[in-house]
Image (cartoon, helix red, strand yellow):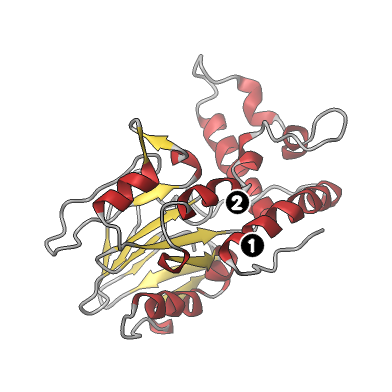
Amino acid sequence: MGVPFAVGSCEWLVGWRDSLTGARDRRVVISDDGHEVAEEGSHERQFIVDDSWSNECERVVMAHFSSYHPTANGSPVPERIHAMNASVKLLLIVREPVTRAISDYTQLRSHATSTASLPTVPAATSHRRFEQLVLRPDGSVNLAYRPLAISLYHSFLHRWLEVFQRHQLLVVNGDLLIQDPVPQLNKIEQFLGLEPRIGRHNFYFNHTKGFYCLRNDTADKCLRESKGRRHPRVDPVVVTKLRKFFSEHNQKFYDLVGEDMGWPEE
C-alpha cells in the first residue's frame, strides 16, 4: 500500500524509510470528527510541522526514526516533539527488516540509475547487486551498508522510549498493512479512541500495482508510478543469512515493544 498515516489531530507518525512511510505524494489524514480522508504533501527527510490545522492539536508530523536519530536541526527530535506535545500518540509502522532493506535497495538503485550521469553519483552504484552490498568479501554481514544498518530497529526505538511512555506508541505491522489494510487501521482507530468508521469500502486492490489504493466518494487514488517497484530476485541463501543475523536484533525490538511481530528467522 505504501501510504503513511497520521490519524487524528494529536497523533504523529514515525517510521523507517520503506516501511510504508516514504510515500511523499500521499499522506492520509483522518480527522477526529468524521474520519475525513485528506491528502498532504510530505517531505521524507525533513522534520515536518504542518501549521495548517485549526484546532488545539493542529500539528501533523512525520519523522523517520533513523533519519532523525539522535538530532534534527541541532536538537533531539523526541525531545522536540515531547516539548511540543507531551501527550502525543505515536504510530510506528515497521516491516520485516530484510524485506525493508531490499525495498530500500530497490529505491536507491532506481534513483542511482536516474542520476548516474551526475558527477557526484558513481555510475557503478546502480549496477551492484544487493548480495554484493550486504555481505563483505569474507561473508559477514555488512552493517556499513545503510539499508541494513537502519533495519536495526531497536537501536533507534530505545531512544524514543526514553522520552515517551510505551502506552503512547502503537506499533503497526507494515507487512500486514500491505496485505490487508483495514484490520490494521481498525487497530489505529481503537488506539486513538475513535469511532470505528474505516472499512473495506475505503480501499480497492490495484492488480497492476499489486497493492491496495484509496477510494472515496469522489475518486480512486493510488500512489505515483515510482511507488510499488518490483523487487529484484535475491539469492535465498543470502536472505536466510540476513534473517538469521537479524533474529537477535528483532528479539530486542520485540522486547522493547512487548510484541512479537512474527518475522521469519531464516
Q: Amino acid at mark 2?
A: His
* Residue appearing at x 83%, y 48% in the figure: 241
Residue designated by label 1: 255
Callout 1 crowding tier (Cα within 10 Å): few <14, some 14–19, many ≥20 = few
Q: Work out whether residue 207 can be spotted.
A: no
Q: Secondary structure at mark 2?
A: helix
**Is residue 92 shown left or right of residue 173?**
left
Toward the top, the furthest residue is: 119
Say which amino acid is labelled 1. Answer: Asp
Q: Position of residue 72 (x, y in %)?
A: 37, 35
Q: Quadrant of residue 139?
A: top right
Q: Position of residue 106 (x, y in %)?
A: 61, 43
Residue 135 appears left or right of 156 = right
Question: Which quarter of the rendering shows the C terminus?
Answer: bottom right
Percent x, y of residue 111: 52, 34
Q: Earlier in the sequence, mark 1 or mark 2?
A: 2
Residue drawn 55% across the image and 42% down it: 107
Q: Which residue is mark 2?
A: 154
Between 49 and 79, the residue placed more toward the observer is 79
Which residue is located at x 14 percent, y 63 percent? Answer: 56
Label 1's element? helix
Could you say which is closer to the camera, residue 149 or residue 205?
149
Label 1–label 2 contact, CB within 8 A = yes
Q: Is residue 264 visible?
A: yes
Number of marks in the rendered image: 2
Q: Callout 2: 10 Å neighbours few (<14), some, many (20+)? A: some
